[in-house]
Image: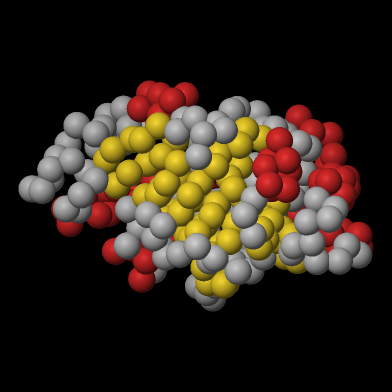
Amino acid sequence: MEIKLLQTSFNDDGSASDRQHTACFVVNGKVAFDAGSLAMAVGSDREDVRDIVLSHTHLDHIAGLPLFVDDLFSTLRSPIRVHATRPMIDALRTHIFNDVIYPDFEEIENDFGQVLEFREYEFGREFTVMDLSILPVEVNHNEPSAGFIVRDGAGSIVLTGDTADTVAIWNSAAEATRLRAVFVECAFPNGMAELASSARHLTPAGLRDEVEKLKGLDVPVYIVNIKPMFREQVIAEVKALDLPDVFIFPIGRTVSI
Ligand SMILES: [Zn+2]
């Protein structure tokens, strides 16, 4: 499986920064998981990505979605498909594609027809997108949010999305076919445990407890979604845990898992 975590911000010299303000993975060059920087950072995959699977509707996970539809509007020969739960779809219709914040792209057609289509998924019910089987599992965040077990012919990975301490997704991970890797968020440093708890994110100390739940699975754990202001501190605290097989996932590079 090929996975790329898109860049989200710039250094002073205009080069891509490692600081991650938003979340968007592109898997196998075709399916986006979340759309934080999709319009801004997707490169040669722009012509191939037509399916976007949302974990939840916090802004850092959807910011690039309306811009992506807008960008491609005149060229789309089939609609962009957004896979989300019913409450997420309702939230996007009410708060984003509402002709105030951005046009209602469900209602505006280009020369070829519809440009945006929502497809509903349910927690616990596997669905298929392109060559991927996707099991959405509810995780522990401030609004109903999914993590995903993503499977292709080569094996499976886990994407937790945004979450605090959680259980169900690790139970699903234990049953996954040829599990290759786990991607876990770690947003805040240990000194901000209170904020992390109320925002339902992990700190390195919380991460250690989650990794403990993975014992026996014997797969690499990649850290993602580090708040940009605290990136160096979180990385230092994760390294200080000295956990084997725990790595910081690179930004802007396609990695074969
Ligand atoms: Zn969130």
Task: Determine the image quadrant of residue 201.
Answer: top right
Q: Would you say 158 lies left or right of 58 here?
A: right
| Residue at image coords 33%, 35% | 118
Q: Is residue 139 in view from this perspective?
A: yes
Residue drawn at the location 83% of the way across and 46% of the way down: 213
In this view, the residue in front, 151 or 120, is: 151
Up/down of 53 relative to 247, above or below: above
Where does residue 186 sit, x and y in percent of width and height? 74, 50
The picture quadrant where one finds residue 66 is top left
Q: Position of residue 182 (x, y in %)?
A: 69, 56
The colour scheme used here is secondary structure
- Quarter in which the C terminus is drawn: bottom right
Task: Place residue 137 in its image quadrant.
Answer: top right
Residue 46: give x, y in percent of width and height: 34, 63
Residue 104 versus residue 130: which sits nearer the camera? 130
| Horizontal side, residue 191 vs residue 109: left or right | right
**Number of numbered tags placed on the structure image:** 0
Residue 7 makes an appearance in the image: no
Reply above or below: 68 against 102. Answer: below
Q: Residue at x 78, y 56 (%)?
A: 217
**Which residue is at 67% across, 42% downward?**
172
Q: Nearer the viewer, residue 199 or 132?
A: 132
Left or right: residue 104 compared with residue 187: left
